[in-house]
Amino acid sequence: MQLQRQLQEVRERSWSGRVRLFLPALMCVGAVVLLAYAPYLISNFYLNVLTEILIYGLLATSINILMGYTGLTSLGHAAFFGLAAYTGAFLSLKNHAGFLNAFLMGLVVATLASVVFGAIALRATGIYFLMITLALNMLVYGTAFTLSPITGAENGMYGVERPDLIFQDYQFYWFTLAVLVISFIVIWRLVRSPFGLTLRGIRESESRMRTLGYNVFLHKLIAFTISGFFAGLAGVLYVYFRSGVSPATVDLPVSVEGVLEVIIGGIGTLFGPMLGAAIIVVARELVSLQIGRWPTVLGVVLIVIVIFARNGILGAYQEWRARRRGQSAPSTAISLTALSASEQSGTADGVPSGEPVPQSDVT
Amino acid sequence: MELLLTLILGGIAYSGLLFLVASGFTLIFGLLRVANLAHGAFYLIGAYLGYDVVRYFGSTNVTFWVAGLAATLGMGIFGVLVERVLLRFVRGQELLEVLITVGLALIMADLALVVFTSDPITFHTPPFLAGRLTIGNFAYPWDHLFVLLMSILVGVGLWFLTAKTRIGAVIRAGVDDAEMVSALGINIKAVFSAVFFLGAALAGLAGVSGALILGVAPGDDSLILRLGLVVVILGGLGSLTGAVIGSLIVGLVFTLGTVYLPELQYFLLFAPMVMMLAVRPRGLFGRA
């Protein structure tokens, strides 16, 4: 600790150190400016691909709140994504509700559903948790398929119109980008807050946190609800992006893609899931344009990544950077293997990888 | 009233089918702790395999048995291949195993769409199962009865195998402590493969049974996985008794829902799941 503080002071005194401290922030601002400038640089087609990346990136980021920072792997987030999308579409098509109403109600429904689903699924841990979220997701899918008066069954519901202010593709892109930037700031603050550290403590050792007097279930439920909220936010954006929904929006591949994007980017990294989403969305566009058979490609990619590249891109980068600096703590990204192992025992103490829980924040 | 009774009888046949599916799933999970989410895809391919055999050799009593055998053995062997080739990389890491089976499920369902197209298929009922059993006002199709009997046979057989035989004792010991079992000189890897064979074979058998009473269509893999998951979550993962009870609940709720509340038939399955998980998170007979 002492040494770290001294290092910090030295860095703050030197110019290069100061730049290095602010470099991540500068890079973020630069990236946002570049993204905001995109409509002037690329055609509408690519702009829509970019919008799609942002939306699916938000969904993946919401999954990462659970997977990366709480140690829970949900295979059911398409449920919240889809519920929000269906609510938005239903209200604006059948009830002729305004944009703001439909948008907010979509969020409310997704958030409420995540409280209920979370309360059910979080009674179990590890693999059971994953299977319950999956089962709940599949029941929502089934209901979307059969509840024809409300969901339009197989064909879904189309014809949702954007309000004038965000009618054009580039306007909607800016809107999505703004929503995304705000979401990221909120999520960034959240994972760095004492609450976020408590979640990571739960990820590392549930039993220890319980012994320290934390209400583990409540913390997990709040994390699940926040995660569901952001999945829902991605869902309502989606409905206005695609001007409608169909059962495919709540289907298993959406959940699987989300989890895969988190793994590809790096579990427990802030921007990793976004990067993963960029790769998956571009790959999906290319595959559907060229050869079709996206599910097969998705399955193959999933298997190959799980077997050969478990730590993802940002995870591998952070590991490389840490090694270059000669630090012992590998990275903020946690490995899939560790997630798997810690889930298996549920109460395992001291899983070797990942960030150690800072003692000062725990007491 | 008569409609209700007929529905309940149909629901019980459906429960039998679900038990065939769930027992294989729960067997693999019980010993290997692998949640095989490709189980629904195994079911689908098994169904198509059986259908192809019957289509190729014509529909007779003999070809029906051959089809059943081909689907059962075929999926069993395929299951062993999956276990030996793919899951070998991630042995013991539950999350990774699940993700690999999810990937496999996507691939299998998509390729089935290429090979067998998206048209639903009606299975030719073999002559000895044509018609129905009539008692008074009630009629029960022979093929439904056949599937029900088959599931009872499989249930009793599995119970006998796990509870009364030496192999079963080894399997049960392997569930509790795989390391100790292998230290006793038993080839635990062979036992693992054997269990995977059995579980996958049951999916294949369920596939043919399902094809017989319901036909086959794309998306059946996901339907079966959906219902199968609810069955094992209700009954408790790894428990045969749980699979029986879970199948009965899901089979009846789903069949009655199809008629009385078709729009909400999936929604109806939430209720038993929520109630069960609120009281017993591990399911009815699940172990901690």
Image (spheres, coloured by chain):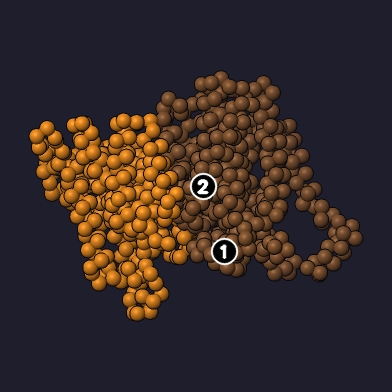
Chain colours: A brown, B orange
- Residue B272 appears left or right of A44: left
Residue nearest the viewer, comparing B82 with B30: B30
Q: Helix or strand or loop: what does disc 2 sit on? A: helix
Q: Can residue A288 be seen in this view?
A: no
Query: Closest to the observer: B90 or A82?
Result: A82
Chain identity of mark 2 = A
Res A325 quadrant in image: bottom right
Distance between mark 2 and mark 1 Cα atoms = 19 Å
Quickly name the residue at label 1.
A207
Q: Nearer the viewer, residue B209 or A124?
A: A124
As shown in the figure, which amino acid type bears the numbered disc 2?
A: Ala
Q: Is residue A50 above or below residue B31?
A: above
Label 1 sits on what residue type? Ser
Give the residue number, with chain letter if any, for mark 2: A119
Task: Give the image location of residue B268, x and y in percent.
Answer: 38, 38
For the point 58% across and 30% down, the residue is A105
Q: Is residue B285 above or below residue B174?
A: above
Are the two marked residues, 2 and 1, in contact with CB atoms closer than 8 angstroms?
no
Is A200 positioned to the left or the right of B131 in the image? right
Q: Write the residue at 34% across / 31% down.
A: B261
Regarding residue B259, the answer to whether it shows in the image is yes
Residue B8, compared with residue A21, is above or below; it is: above
Farthest bottom residue in view: B184
Other-residue count near label 1 (Cα within 10 Å), few / some / many at <14 / 14–19 / ≥20: some
- N-terminal of the pair, mark 2 or mark 1, is 2
